Image (spheres, rainbow, N blue to C red):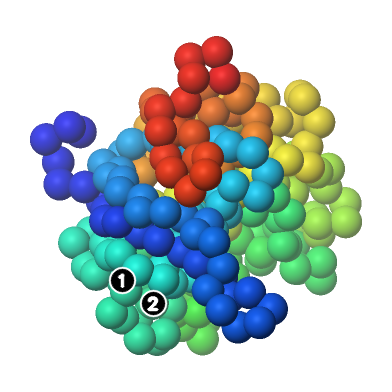
């Protein structure tokens, strides 16, 4: 993994949000430089409001930096138009959020297949089979036809993880994925993410307050005062 070209590269990335008066506010991200290798598992920790979600959104093309460069698989994201960025999100990036954002009227399997519908009017049988296989991989084969209202919080989040993987992304981004779960469900989800990182050979970037989850990743960085630094060993 160390010899591979980075999958994600951030170069001097700065992000400022305008003040109510329209002026540039303080830097949420202040010259961030970061490289994430293919297949790497990285956790970013830090205080609330430190900019962890902003960093993740910039990597995932949901937000743009005020300054600096962002590259994914060698492609410069900052210069892409909105359509090109949406295509990158659909094809190369999977997202898991603290709130699962499942469609309540759809079954578990139907929810997993939603991203595939962005690519075609109907879902090919091979993609449906991958959806069923992913449900099995996250331990929910017997919940395939259940709607979110009949699933536990941990089960809903596992469906969300499977949905994020349906298009075989190279990069999985997880924003506080265990934040709404109890301890047992959080531990199970941490196990699942670590295993999928290895089995699917995808890069994983997790932002979290949970050090138990962060320690499952291969590298832990702390975001504080706009800068990324190696996290303290004791968390």
User: Which residue corresponds to mark 2?
Assistant: 85
Q: Nearer the viewer, residue 177 or 56?
A: 56
Q: Is residue 193 above or below residue 29?
A: above
Comparing labels 1 and 2, the label whose residue is closer to the camera: 1
How many numbered discs sit on the rendered protein? Answer: 2
**What number is the disc on residue 10?**
none
Which quadrant is home to the C terminus? top right
In the image, residue 80 lies at what x, y percent? 31, 81
Q: Secondary structure at mark 1?
A: loop
**Is 15 left, or right, of 139 in this rendering?**
left
Residue in view at x 55 percent, y 36 percent? 45
Residue 128 appears anywhere in the view: no
Residue 16 appears anywhere in the view: yes
**Is 77 left, or right, of 153 in this rendering?**
left
Of all residues, the one furthest to the right in this rendering is 149
Q: Are marks 1 and 2 in contact (CB under 8 Å)?
A: yes
Q: CA distance from mark 1 to mark 2?
A: 7 Å
Of all residues, the one furthest to the top in this rendering is 234
Task: Tell me which numbered mark, 1 or 2, is placed earlier along the sequence.
Answer: 1
**Is 15 left, or right, of 100 in this rendering?**
left
Q: Secondary structure at mark 2?
A: helix
Tell me which corner region of the image, top left, top right, bottom left or bottom right, holds residue 111. bottom right
User: Which residue corresponds to mark 1?
Assistant: 77
Residue in view at x 72 percent, y 62 percent? 101
For label 1, count other residues whose C-alpha is less than 10 Å away and answer few (under 14), some (14-19) or many (20+).
many
In the image, residue 232 lies at what x, y percent? 49, 19
In the image, residue 133 lies at what x, y percent? 52, 47
Which quadrant is home to the N terminus? top left
């Amino acid at each position: 993994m160390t010899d591979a070209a980075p999958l994600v590269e951030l170069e001097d990335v700065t992000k400022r949000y305008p003040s109510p008066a329209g002026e540039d506010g303080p830097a949420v991200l202040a010259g961030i430089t970061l490289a994430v290798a293919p297949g790497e598992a990285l956790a970013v920790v830090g205080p609330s409001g430190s900019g962890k979600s902003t960093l993740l959104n910039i990597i995932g093309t949901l937000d743009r930096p005020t300054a600096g460069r962002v590259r994914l698989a060698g492609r410069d994201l900052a210069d892409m138009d909105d359509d090109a960025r949406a295509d990158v999100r659909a094809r190369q990036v999977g997202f898991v959020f603290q709130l699962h954002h499942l469609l309540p009227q759809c079954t578990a399997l139907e929810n997993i297949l939603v991203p595939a519908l962005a690519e075609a009017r109907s879902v090919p049988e091979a993609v449906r089979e991958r959806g069923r296989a992913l449900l099995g991989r996250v331990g929910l084969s017997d919940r395939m036809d259940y709607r979110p209202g009949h699933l536990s919080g941990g089960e809903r989040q596992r469906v969300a993880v499977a949905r994020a993987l349906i298009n075989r992304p190279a990069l999985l981004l997880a924003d506080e994925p265990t934040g709404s779960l109890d301890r047992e469900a959080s531990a199970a989800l941490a196990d699942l993410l670590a295993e999928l990182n290895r089995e699917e050979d995808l890069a994983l970037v997790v932002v979290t307050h949970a050090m138990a989850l962060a320690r499952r990743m291969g590298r832990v960085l702390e975001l504080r005062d706009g800068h990324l630094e190696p996290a303290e060993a004791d968390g």
